[in-house]
Image: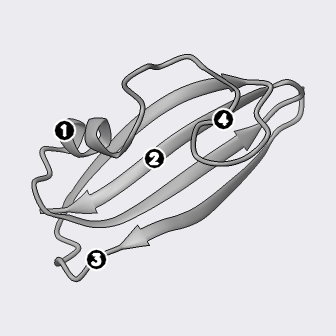
Amino acid sequence: MASCTIVSPVTATNNPIGDKVGKSETGCIFYVGGLSSGIVMNKNYGIVEAAQNGGITKIATVDVETTNYIIFTKKTLVVTGE
């Protein structure tokens, strides 16, 4: 099974990047584009969950890592901040 991972920026703010990192992961079946299209496995997937997982109250950047397989896609939101 082959895969390809792409990291893309989603947004950035004027807040300092800081040393905290939070992640939110989900799997998508029949992914066609966007942050969470297709059938999403994790209902809590999103920027809020990533910030909570990293203990972040001031978000600086948000990136999305997309790993594509044949009909399955793994999405990881990576949030940095303080």
For marks 2 and 4, the one nearer the N-term is 4
The type of colouring in the image is: one colour
Measured Cα–Cα span from mark 3 to mark 4: 25 Å
Q: Name the residue that disc number 2 marks.
A: 77
Q: Nearer the viewer, mark 2 or mark 3?
A: 3
**Res 31 quadrant in image:** top right
Q: Residue at x 66, y 46 (%)?
A: 66
Disc 1 and disc 3 in contact, CB within 8 angstroms: no
Q: Name the residue that disc number 3 marks.
A: 13
Q: Badge 4: how crowded within 10 Å, few (<14), some, or many (20+)?
A: few
Disc 3 and disc 4 in contact, CB within 8 angstroms: no
Give the residue type at disc 4: Ser
On screen, residue 34 versus residue 79, left or right, reads right
Is residue 26 placed above or below 59 in the rendered structure?
A: above
> Of the numbered discs in the image, which one, if any, rests on residue 37?
4
**Res 40 quadrant in image:** top right
For marks 1 and 3, the one nearer the N-term is 3
Q: Name the residue that disc number 1 marks.
A: 52
Disc 2 and disc 3 in contact, CB within 8 angstroms: no
For marks 1 and 2, the one nearer the N-term is 1
Measured Cα–Cα span from mark 1 to mark 4: 22 Å
Give the residue type at disc 2: Leu
Can you give x and y, in whole percent of width and height, for residue 20 in the image? 19, 56
The N terminus - image quarter: top right
Q: Nearer the viewer, mark 3 or mark 4?
A: 4
Q: Nearer the viewer, mark 1 or mark 4?
A: 4
